[in-house]
């Protein structure tokens, strides 16, 4: 998150020849699986607050990027990965991509823009179903 935040901040100051940013995952299994929820249980409150602040800074930098951001979702986009995709200007996903706010299944509120952007995109009731249900949905369902 630190590297991505710093990269996006530098583009804000000087985009140079960059015409767009295309975050994607390596391989075809995952775009971004988000934070390790098992690790969260062992974190101190201070560590969690630091991690959450970093996630907010990275997301803000993504959403304020002066050049277009296209999320190329090539697999699972869970938790923070789903929010990373939502922070982009455009999302293009393979048919096998899955999205979910999985952290909600263990009582953790989404830390990124999911709770703010998702209702704007899909409506309040569908957003509540996605967030509170914590169940994966397909690229086709996301498109619909």
Image: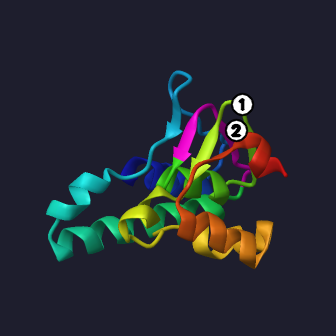
Label 1, residues with CA under 10 Å away: few <14, some 14-19, many ≥20: some
Distance between the Cα atoms at labels 2 and 1? 28 Å
Q: 58 and 144: which one is in front?
A: 144
Q: Is residue 111 left or right of residue 64?
A: left
Q: How far across and how far down the image is residue 75, in percent?
A: 58, 33
Label 2 residue SS: loop
Q: How far across and how far down the image is residue 43, in percent?
A: 17, 64
**Residue at point 77%, 48% (across, down):** 141
Residue 138 is one of the magenta-drawn residues = no
**Residue at point 64%, 76% (across, down):** 116
Residue 74 is one of the magenta-drawn residues = yes
Q: Is residue 30 left or right of residue 130?
A: left
**How many numbered marks does the figure carry?**
2
Q: Which residue is disc 1 drawn over? A: 94
Q: Is residue 60 visible?
A: no
Which of marks 1 and 2 precedes in the sequence?
Answer: 2
- Kindly indicate the quadrant of the structure image that contains residue 52: bottom left
Q: Is residue 129 visible?
A: yes
Q: How far across and how far down the image is residue 93, in percent?
A: 72, 37
Label 1 residue SS: loop
Residue reaching furthest to the right: 144
**Residue at point 66%, 42% (across, down):** 21
Q: Which residue is disc 2 drawn over? A: 17
Mark number, residue 128: none
Magenta stretch in the rendered image: 67-77
Q: 89 and 78: which one is in front?
A: 78
- Kindly indicate the quadrant of the structure image that contains residue 12: bottom right
Q: 129 and 60: which one is in front?
A: 129
Q: 47 and 34: which one is in front?
A: 34
């Amino acid at each position: 998150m630190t590297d991505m935040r710093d990269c996006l901040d530098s583009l804000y100051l000087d985009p140079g020849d960059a015409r767009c940013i295309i975050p994607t995952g390596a391989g075809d299994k995952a775009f971004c699986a988000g934070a390790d929820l098992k690790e969260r249980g062992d974190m101190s409150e201070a560590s969690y607050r630091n991690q959450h602040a970093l996630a907010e800074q990275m997301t803000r930098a993504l959403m304020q990027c002066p050049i277009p951001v296209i999320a190329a979702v090539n697999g699972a986009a869970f938790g923070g990965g789903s929010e990373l995709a939502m922070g982009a200007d455009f999302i293009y996903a393979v048919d096998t991509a899955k999205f979910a706010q999985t952290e909600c299944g263990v009582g953790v509120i989404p830390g990124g823009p999911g709770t703010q952007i998702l209702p704007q995109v899909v409506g309040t009731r569908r957003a509540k179903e996605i967030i509170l249900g914590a169940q994966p949905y397909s690229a086709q369902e996301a498109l619909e």
